[in-house]
Image: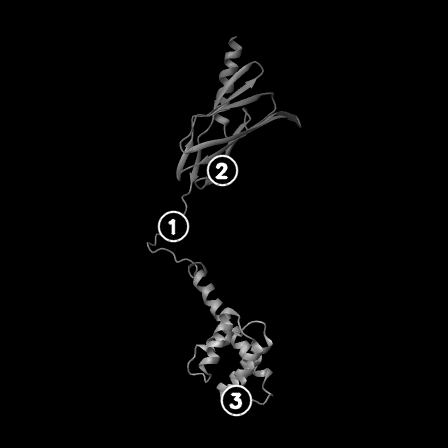
Amino acid sequence: MLVRIVQFICFSCFGILAFGETGSSGISATLVPDEVKPGDVFELRVEMDRAEYAKFSLDIPAQQHMHRIAVETVPVTFTEGRYRQSEKWLLQADASGSYVIKGGKVLLETGGDTLSVPLPELELVVIPYENADENPDPAELPEEIIDRSSRVSYWFWVGSLLVSISIFVMLMRRHSNKSVAGDTVENSLLFLIADELEQSKEPPIVLEKLIHDKEVGISEDLRERLIRYIYSGSGDPKLLAEELRKEAAQ
């Protein structure tokens, strides 16, 4: 009994002196990494590597601003004449600062004996994130978000205008070689509209503007008949086109 007490005291002393590196206890402890940011996960690794058989378990109290997420234990193995075991604690830091993991111990079982070997104090540095820009002015939203609806409306009207101009240019080119009565732009336009009215299934786009322009030289009777044709569909477009040509030729 006395021999076992002496062995226990000697083993404990050597274990305490050699802890943190592979010594007579064969136990080492490290933090990987030992410098993190708030929210980062790090490992507390405790490993055993010794010639004599043993196995261990960890007893670590709760630590300030550290939360245990998971534990990974690798049981004792015997390879190349060495007994090896490891245990990893996955921890998460929740605040910046410098903290020391302390109060932990390793319960080392060697045959029928259980030895309590204290863990060395391990320091963890939690680096704060860089200070955010504290500009009181709100950031401007991208232009495409602010003006999305207005830009859609803008491009719609631009597109409509371009279509109208294209139609007018197309009509002018189509009839550029035709002889038309009169030498004014107004009469030429009336002839073009008459041709389009005669060939199209629907009233030309420019016809509605024409009938509301009092300066256009057409009679009120023809104007009213064109209005009825545009809005109610009544009337013969070919007949209306012919009368439009006659008035344009006067």
Q: Residue at x 49, y 67 (%)?
A: 156
Query: What amino acid is at disc 1?
Result: Ala
Up/down of 96 relative to 232, above or below: above
Mark closer to the observer (1, 2): 1
Please tell me how crowded label 2 is: few (under 14), some (14-19), or many (20+) other residues with Cα within 10 Å: some
Mark 3 lies on a secondary structure that is: helix
Locate residue 49, reporting x and y percent: 58, 27
Identify the residue shown where x is 57% and y is 81%: 195
Residue nearest the observer in this picture, 3 or 177: 177
Residue 46 appears in the rendering: no
- The Cα atoms of the two marked residues, 3 and 2, are separated by 91 Å
| Count of picture labels | 3
Q: Residues within 10 Å of mark 3 (few under 14, many from 20)?
A: some
Residue farthest toward the right in the current orientation of the protein: 80
* Residue 41 image label: 2
How far across and how far down the image is residue 23, in percent? Answer: 54, 27
Please say which color scheme the image uses: one colour
Dot 3 corresponds to which residue? 249
Residue 234 image point, x, y percent: 53, 71
Q: CA distance from mark 1 to mark 2?
A: 23 Å
Q: Which mark is residue 64?
A: none
Q: Farthest residue to the bottom: give it.
A: 183
Disc 1 crowd rating (10 Å Cα; few below 14, some 14-19, many 20+) is: few
Q: Please name whichever residue, 206 or 6, is drawn nearer the observer in this view of the structure.
A: 206
Between residue 3 and residue 229, name the one nearer to us.
Answer: 229
**What kind of residue is marked 3?**
Ala
Write down the quadrant of residue 111 in the picture: top right
- Residue labelled with disc 1: 132
